[in-house]
Image: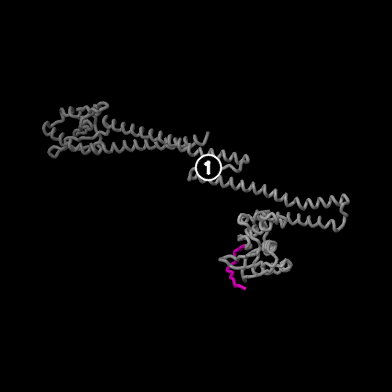
Amino acid sequence: MSFSWKLLGAMVLAVSLAVGGTYIFSTHGIRSGFAAYLSRMRQAQGQELAELLGAYWAQNHSWAGVSRFFAFQVTITFSHGAIRQSGPLGQYILVDNRGKVVACGEPGYMGRTVSQEELRYGIPIVHQGEVVGTLVPVGKVGPLEESFLREVRVASLAGGAMGLAAAAILGAVLAFQLARPLRHLIHATERIAAGELSHRVRIRARDEIGRLARAFNHMAESLERSERARKHLLADIAHELRTPLTVIQGNLEAMLDGVFPLSQESLAPVYEETLQLAELVEDLRELTLAEAGKLPLQREPLDLGQLAERVCEAIRPVAAEEGIHLELELGRDLLVEADPKRIRQVLGNILANALRYSPAGGTVSVSVRREGNGAVVTVRDQGPGIPPEDLPHIFERFYKGDPARSGQGSGLGLAIAKAIVEAHGGRIWAESRLGEGTAVSFSLPLRGDGSSESA
């Protein structure tokens, strides 16, 4: 059974139970309340009738002939028919002072002895201080009252039927409106499962169904991006592996064919390419572990200023060879909880990129400062800068914006740096202008209440 029919059936069943329960309780309540109303009304009316009967006794000194007043009936005409109804005394029985029924509207009561319990609800008829009889109300509902109650029941049933019909119509409309977007979602899910990751669901509502559709579209976009990234990653890995493997294969074939002698000089390029392959595989392993949150981190209290100073001093000879000046501005006592080896790796990757793209005679500046509750490390170069369209992608795997430099590096350094910084609870970003250089920064949360003093 489809969702639409289940929803419609559930709504009709719920409304049917509500209508049935309302009908039962309302009719029972109306009948009970109406009976109580009749009883009170007859009590009040009986006071006047008792006075009239007292006058009858005063005139006749007996109840002989009084029965004709109890048997009196009237005809009430309606637009849809007529009802024969007892007169005012037809809803009472008259009991003499010995407890016997001497007059009533219903023959079944004549001659019967009334108990004291029944007489308790009666209205005494008094003549000259003496009780000569009792007028007892009869609880029976007359034809007129029955007609009223019947009309109430019919009206309740008609209202319930109309409510049920309205609920069925509204339920059908609602079920269709709910089922239609669900069918679209099912169809879209099937297309996504079949590999059509570009398929999207049209969003027409702002309710929970609309939120579900938006979530589905976000999921489809994520899947499409992941699939695109997977394909790019495989292509990039194949491209990065192809060059060193081609060099290794070519050199080995040349040696086997006798073109190159089997010597240390011939094997050196092969060895260098194997080292590059090993470095690429290790970078991929580290990046995969970091992105999966499984990169082992040996955290300890670490002064970022001191670490940056040591890294810069280690790389200063390389910078001097390239004719590049290193400029340091290091804050002190900026303690973070981090893995020194991994943070050194991050800063080393950023510095390597800065040196690679800085011109001879240029300056690379390194600063460590406090910003809010974090310590920020910034490496700024005087290179050509990064085009605005490339800047958002420089932390992606194997991304190389400038084709002229595609042979430099594996394209994993900044991606690894980003993964390591985020594993420490920090963030990394870059700012650049063409012709004005690039600044790459990363921040880490400070440990405790670390403070900063400029050096």
Indicate the quadrant where residue 297 lies: bottom right
Nearest the viewer among 453 and 360 is 360
Q: Residue at x 70, y 62 (%)?
A: 356
Question: With respect to residue 334, does 107 lie above or below?
Answer: above
Labels in figure, total: 1
Question: With respect to residue 306, does 111 lie above or below?
Answer: above
Q: Which residue is mark 1?
A: 202
Q: Quadrant of the C terminus?
A: bottom right
Residue 279 in magenta stretch? no
Q: Residue at x 37, y 35 (%)?
A: 23
Indicate the quadrant where residue 429 lies: bottom right
Q: Residue at x 38, y 33 (%)?
A: 161
Residue 448 in magenta stretch? yes
Give left or right: position of 412 versus 102: right
Give left or right: position of 303 versus 139: right
Instruction: Please give the range of residues in magenta.
Output: 441-455
> In this view of the protein, can residue 15 be seen by the observer?
yes
> In this view of the protein, can residue 298 be seen by the observer?
no
- Amino acid on which the number 1 mark rests in the picture: Arg
Disc 1 is placed on an element classified as loop
Residue 405: x and y, percent?
70, 56
Q: Residue at x 51, y 43 (%)?
A: 203
